[in-house]
Amino acid sequence: MAAELALKTSEFEDKVLNSQIPVLIDFWAEWCGPCRLIAPAVEEVAREFAGQAAVYKVNVDQEPELAEKFGIMSIPSILVFKGGQKVGQIIGAVPKAKIVELIKSQI
């Protein structure tokens, strides 16, 4: 499932800023242990909230301009956007319940 969640810089405006539903983005990297720990939870959230929220993953090594644009200094970092604006953020590996709480607060 992770491949279809991948978000490229060129898609950001269309898929995130112009989205009619909240968007959760997981900034991660292959070499990041904590990122691998939360990956299954992020994918579960994507399935559970399909239609209510969009979920994407940004590999910071492949899309450094997006990571830089949002000041991503630590990964994993999860950002939530609504109406084209950043409305929430979680830094670090957290339980799935925290991710669910963040996205539910914007639905």
Image (tube, rainbow, N blue to C red):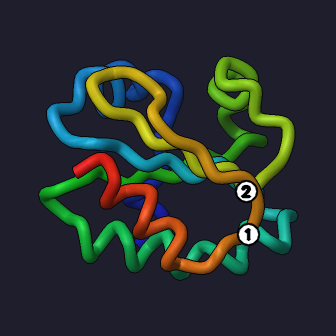
- Residue at figure coordinates x 37%, y 56% from the top left: 103
Q: Amino acid at mark 2?
A: Pro
Label 1, on which residue? 93
Can you give x and y, in whole percent of width and height, for residue 77 in the image? 68, 50
Mark 1 and mark 2 in contact? Answer it, CB < 8 Å.
yes
Q: How many C-alpha atoms fall within 10 Å of the one at disc 1: few (<14), some, or many (≥20)?
A: some
Mark identifier at residue 76? 2
The quadrant in which the N terminus is found is bottom left
Q: Earlier in the sequence, mark 1 or mark 2?
A: 2
Residue 74, position in %: x, y? 84, 46
Name the element at disc 1.
Answer: loop
Residue shown at the point (76%, 60%) measured from the top left: 92
Is 41 placed left or right of 62 in the picture? left
Q: Is residue 52 left or right of residue 39?
A: left
Tell whether 97 sits left or right of 62.
left
| Vertical relation: 95 (above or below) 104 | below
Looking at the rendered structure, the kind of residue marked 1 is Ala
Q: Quadrant of residue 63?
A: top right
Residue at 51 percent of width and 41 percent of height = 88
Q: Secondary structure at mark 2?
A: loop
Depicted 65 relative to depicted 99: above or below: above
In which quarter of the view is residue 60 placed? Answer: top right
Name the residue nearer the viewer: 46 or 92: 92
